[in-house]
Amino acid sequence: MEETLTIIKPDAVRAGNAGRIIAHLEDAGFVIQAIRRIRLSRAQAEAFYAVHRERPFFEDLVAFMTSGPAVAIALARENAVAHLRDTMGATDSAQAAPGTIRNLYGTNIQNNAIHGSDSPDNARVERAFFFAGCDLVG
Ligand code: ATP
Ligand code: MG
């Protein structure tokens, strides 16, 4: 099975939708290998989204991701990276297809409820950011 990493973002946790999103992911066939409630520091958020450092929305993104608790989850499934992206929907919640997590629980292009790794290589890096090997349960 392929592995990936998701974060239920602070907007969704604040709205009380973490449990519904976890159920949505399980219904979509993902196995939860590890799960942690997190509160990102500024340095952690900047490191996690370092690829976007030069983008105009970077400061707002860091402020959003540090605005409250989030939930990091290590996931496994066949074709997990691509399937998670499909299950999440488009980055802009207003454009996300009906029934996707961002359509159901996101608000706009920034407050979009959920993060998903965009490649197997990035999934490995992002999983190691939050979880040690001993945390992961098949
Ligand atoms: P994520 O990496 O969180 O799974 P994504 O891969 O769909 O989202 P990215 O392009 O990697 O989208 O952007 C990372 C995050 O930055 C988005 O999820 C969103 O929260 C924020 N973001 C992206 N584009 C914009 C924008 N134009 N304005 C404001 N925020 C944005
Ligand atoms: Mg991304």
Image (cartoon, rainbow, N blue to C red):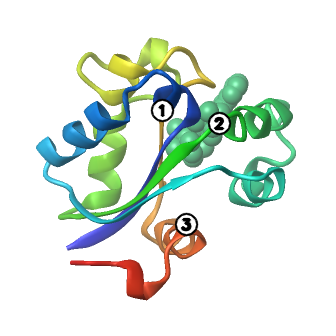
Asked whether the viewer can see residue 91, the reply is no
Judge by depth and name the residue closer to the eye, 32 or 99. Answer: 32
Q: Which mark is residue 13?
A: 1
Q: From what the image shows, is residue 102 above or below residue 21?
A: above
Q: Are marks 2 and 1 in contact (CB under 8 Å)?
A: yes
Give the quarter of the image for residue 28. top left
Q: From what the image shows, is residue 78 above or below residue 30?
A: below
User: Marks 2 and 3: which is nearer the front?
Assistant: 2
Measured in 3D between alpha carbons, the distance from the residue under mark 2 to the one under mark 3, in whole angstroms, is 19 Å
Quadrant (top left/top right/bottom left/bottom right) for the N terminus: bottom left
Q: Few, some or many C-alpha atoms within 10 Å of disc 1 (few <14, some 14-19, many ≥20)?
A: some
- Is ligand 1 closer than 8 angstroms to the Cβ of mark 3? no
Report the residue marked by disc 3: 126
Callout 2: SS: loop
Measured in 3D between alpha carbons, the distance from the residue under mark 2 to the one under mark 1, in whole angstroms, is 8 Å
Measured in 3D between alpha carbons, the distance from the residue under mark 3 to the one under mark 1, in whole angstroms, is 20 Å
Dividing the image into four quarters, tell me where ligand 1 lies: top right
Q: Position of residue 6 (x, y in %)?
A: 43, 52
Q: Are marks 2 and 3 in contact (CB under 8 Å)?
A: no
Q: Residue at x 63, y 25 (%)?
A: 110
Q: From what the image shows, is residue 117 above or below residue 76?
A: above
Q: Few, some or many C-alpha atoms within 10 Å of disc 2 (few <14, some 14-19, many ≥20)?
A: some
Callout 3: SS: helix
Judge by depth and name the residue closer to the eye, 31 or 108. Answer: 31
- Is ligand 1 closer than 8 angstroms to the Cβ of mark 2? no
Q: Residue at x 56, y 16 (%)?
A: 108
Q: Residue at x 17, y 64 (%)?
A: 78
Report the residue marked by disc 2: 68
Q: Position of residue 20 (x, y in %)?
A: 27, 31
Indicate the amino acid at tag 3.
Answer: Glu
